[in-house]
Every structure is written in C-alpha cells, then in structure tokens.
Image (tube, rainbow, N blue to C red):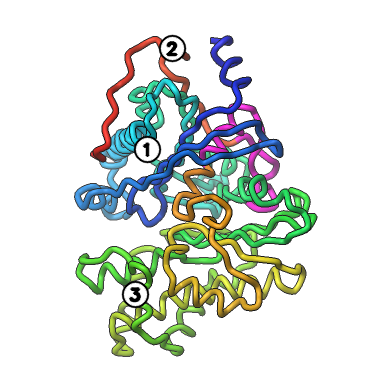
Amino acid sequence: MLAYWERLLTKTPKKVIGLNSGTSYDGIDAALVELAGWGRQTRLHLIAYRNYPYSAASRRQLAKLFSPRTGRVDRLCRGNFYLGHLFATAALALIKEAGLTPAAIDLIGSHGQTVYHLPRPVMVEGIPVRATLQLGEPAVIAERTGITTVADFRVRDVAAGGAGAPLLPYVDYLLFGRDEGRCRIIQNIGGIANLTLVGGGLRPEEIIAFDTGPGNMVIDGVVSRLTGGRFRYDRDGQIAAAGQVHAGLLAKLLDHPYFAQKPPKTTGREEFGDDYVTAVLAEGAKYGLSTPDLTATVTALTVETIARHYEAYLFPRYKIDEVIVGGGGASNPTLLAMLAQRVAPVPVRRHEDYGLPSAGKEAVAFAVLANETIHGQPASFPAVTGAAHPVVLGKIIPAFGCGRDRPQEKTTSRQR
C-alpha cells in the first residue's frame, strides 16, 4: 500500500478526471487533465472535456431529493448510490472518448451533486450546527472505475466553522493569480454566480471571493416553467434578446436581503431555487410580462447583482484589468453583452481565451483540488469561507487493493 501511494504522489504528470454536477442539475461535467506539481507549482493541460446530460427521468428523480417535501430518507439513501453510478458512467465514458483505459488514469476528483447547503449555524441541543450534503457515492465511483477517488470536498471546511463555499477561489488563485501585474475578477456563472479576485499582488490571505447571487438558476427555472419544459434554459440567450427588461420588477427583485449582506457569503438553491422562481413568476404575471420580457428581466437580475457587488467591494479598492467569465452563463451571449456593457470599460473575456472550457471550469477545478488533497495541501481560504483555519479538502477512497489487481469494467459512452 505504501508503495502505491509513493508511486501516485511522485508520478508527474498525473492524468486526473474531475467530475461535477452543478446547482442547475442538468448533467455531469467531466474533464480529463494532466497535472504536474501541486500548490503554486501546479501546471495544467486539458486533454478532454464533455458534458453528459441527465435524462428527463434522472432529472425528475433528482428534483425529488432537493425538496424538504419529497426528499425522504430512503430517496436520499438510494439517490446517493444512484448518482454514484451516473458519475462513474460519465468518468468511464470520458476515458473511452479520450482513447484511454481506466488503468491510464491516476485519480478522480468528484464534487457530486449538492442536495442541501446550510452554511448558517443553527443551535441544536446547544451545539451550533452548519451542514452541507453532496450526493454521488465516491465508493461506487472507485469500485466501478478502479481509480482512487477524492470526494466530499466541502464538509471539512464546514466542520472548521466555514461555509464550505466557495471552493473555486483556490483554483482560480493557482491558475490565474500568477501574473501579479494583472488584477483579475474570475467570474463563475453557474446555477449560482460567484467571483474571485486574484493577481495584482494579492497574497492568499487577501483573496476576495463570494457568491453574488443567482447565476443561471432563476433564468433556467423561469424558461422551463414558462415553456412547459420544452426548453430547460435560454439557449444562446435568444429568449432574453427578444424581450425588454422591466425596471419595476427588476427593482423589486433586487430588494432580496441576500444582496445587501456583506461578504464573505454564500447562497444556493435554498434561497433562489424553485420557491423563489414561483414567486418571480407570480410577480411577472402581475405586470403582465411576456416570456421574453420576464426572461430578459431575470437575466438582468444576474448581471445587475454581479455588477453591484463589483461596485461595492472591488472597483473602489482595486484597478481591475479584466473579468474572465466561466460556467454555463459564459455560453449566453445576451448575458455576456449585458455584463460587458454594465462593467465597461473593463474588458470581459471567457475562459476559452485562456485554454479552459467555460462550461467545464468546475470539473477542471475538482481535478486540481483532488491533486491537492492527496498531497496533503490545504486548499481553502478562511477569509473566503469563514473557517477557523485552512483545511485539506475531501475524503480519499483508494482504488481496489490500492492497485490494478482486478479486471477493469468495460467503458461505455452511453450515459445511463
């Protein structure tokens, strides 16, 4: 066993797969990267990236897990293993598409699927309890792939008194913070939008990062509901582009208390999920808004909350050289155009301009974090999450026998 770990730790470069399913729960992002070194010496090369969409039936199963009304204990228990199989299938499919075998892969980092996130402490029998829950059993992934798997990245930070989020700032610091002469905002627009300020001579303890509010979550929810499920998101921002922003409704939406909270802060589906979308639809109906107008308005909500946080916490203190956008929102030209107009003259670019897939940034990040974990490297910023100290993230599930001593499962490109 010791020989196995010594080989794993000293091998360079390593081939590592990162897996993630975001708060929009539309599918599994899988990225295969080569990683040399760790910490500030990390060097990354992207080999392959794919998104494996969930089937309609899978999405219905997942939706039952997110709601306190339907998320029964038996469903959560079974869903954890069900998701583990889906994540394993995605990893095996990516390996096959890359023309490799599982034996060529050194490590998997899987974020899983966040089901519930409770970063604010609640007293339970005199104990202040924070909690977070990600499903997608890593033991299933390790068993089916024969690859050592790192998962459950958020819980150690929560145990140390942090919010367990955001976790991408450490990776943003490694990938984009080396050029100290350029001060950059790394803006992720997934289901939730979050930012990281790096470069400009900032030391790790000075990194600023937090969730600005909804990213694609509300847009997707509005589009799905108003189209009766025919569309799950606003492809290329076409619906919003055909509408007009309703200033009155936008002003009302901007009154949400989360936007007035000072960072560090984090949010999720608990605040901006289905119940919030229902309230937005009701308000839109009061104003008699069309589908394009309401879609344009909630798109503006994402943009405006991002820009207002820049204006409140970043622009007054730092000379920003550029904004680099990743996440699914980077594929929405209408949203990007609105953001570029709102933050001008600061240029807005996409991760593709730097050799990374915008939609797969988080999958890449969890590959990097898995590599940090096996090297025992703390990969959290207490100033960002609120934890008492930096922590090593994740739990390690060794491959069978800590080696390659059993036949590997045949790969399949079909997502089950």
The region drawn magenta spans: 366-392
**Residue 167 pos. (x, y %):** 57, 48
255 left or right, relative to 26: right
First in sequence, mark 1 or 2: give its number: 1
Name the element at disc 3.
helix
Residue 386 included in the magenta stretch of the image: yes
Name the element at disc 1.
loop
**Residue 124 pos. (x, y %):** 51, 46
Quarter residue 239 falls in: bottom left
Name the element at disc 2.
helix
Quarter residue 223 falls in: bottom left
| Residue nearer the viewer, 294 or 367 | 367
User: To which residue does mark 2 refer?
Assistant: 401
User: To which residue does mark 3 refer?
Assistant: 238
Q: Check the image and report above or below for 78 versus 397.
A: below
Distance between the alpha carbons at the discs numbered 1 and 2 = 22 Å
Q: Amino acid at mark 3?
A: Gln
